[in-house]
Amino acid sequence: MGRLDGKAAVITGGSQGIGRATVELFIAEGAKVVVADLLASEGEALCDRLGPDCVFCKTDVTVEDQVRNLIEVAVKRFGRIDCLFNNAGILGQTGGIESMEVDRFDRVMASHGRSVMLGMKHVAPYMKQQGFGSIINTGSISGIQAVSAYMDYSAAKAAVIHLTKCVAMELGEFGIRVNSVSPGQIATGMGKTGPDALEKAAVLRELNKTRQPIPRSGMPEDVAFAALYLASDESSFVNGHDLVVDGGLIGGSSWTERQRMSASVHGALQRQA
């Protein structure tokens, strides 16, 4: 028996990376899934491979009419909507505040912040009518710690995490749980597709090995399993929570690195004595 048997879910950004891994896992666990993305060929190919319980809906998650339509598609097709995973988003821009491109800043904020708001806005009436539902929003440890290299992305993810908590307080009274999942360093295609995505993910797997106490890169499946828990009845008393999936990265440098730094400081002080 699957952990999501009989449930219907919508997953945005579902054609690649974390979204695709989550679609595959939800289907394997018995859910029916509507995949939303702008990458139509990738999304349609994924659904063709996974079978009739997986349906693609091309959607720009920053456009309200398209998000409204997405939710309606899920309800009309499956008669219910148990889970909405707001996962779509784009990369931020590097550089300092003086070089920030305003149009790009607005696109990043819309891709993460507005899209999450729109998803929750349009799924809420259906879930209220049902008396149950789970909304999951993709945050990031960049929204918890300041990341000056991608400050627009970091600010957008902070907004997602806080908006999640605010809406959880409202919708919890209707039996609807609202949580976020915040990945750390995850090896994905980083916006690439096809062979380029595989090459990018392979590079990131190698680079990420030593960035956190657990000595391997985070994988899309790691986040997918966190989303599975939040979508399932196993998390029925979890609301307004941000589930961090980062191998311990948010705690700072690894124990070995800290010991090395401590030894270096101790040695310098000894030489001064």
Image (cartoon, helix red, strand yellow):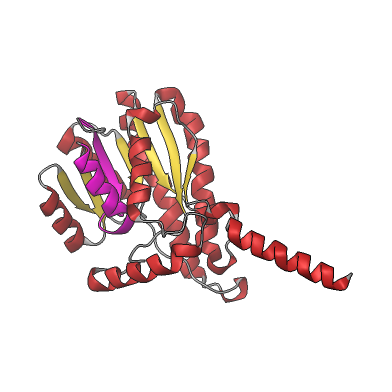
Q: Can residue 146 be spotted in the picture?
A: no
Q: Is residue 135 magenta?
A: no
Q: Position of residue 113 (x, y in %)?
A: 46, 52
Q: Quadrant of residue 181?
A: top left
Q: Quadrant of residue 10?
A: top left
Q: Nearer the viewer, residue 196 or 137?
A: 196
Q: Quadrant of residue 199?
A: bottom left
Q: Is the residue 231 above or below the residue 261 in the image? A: above
Q: Nearer the viewer, residue 242 or 100?
A: 242
Q: Is the residue 126 above or below the residue 119 in the image? A: above
Q: Can residue 25 be spotted in the picture?
A: yes
Q: Position of residue 18 (x, y in %)?
A: 33, 54
Q: Residue at x 20, y 42 (%)?
A: 27
Q: Is the residue 136 above or below the residue 173 in the image? A: below
Q: Quadrant of the C terminus?
A: bottom right
Q: Residue at x 16, y 46 (%)?
A: 54
Q: Position of residue 232 (x, y in %)?
A: 32, 32
Q: Residue at x 39, y 30 (%)?
A: 235
Q: Which residues are magenta?
A: 5-29
Q: Residue at x 43, y 57 (%)?
A: 110
Q: Nearer the viewer, residue 6 or 79?
A: 6
Q: Quadrant of the N terminus?
A: top left
- Residue farthest to the right? 273
Q: Is the residue 155 above or below the residue 22 in the image? A: below
Q: Position of residue 190 (x, y in %)?
A: 36, 66
Q: Is residue 27 magenta?
A: yes
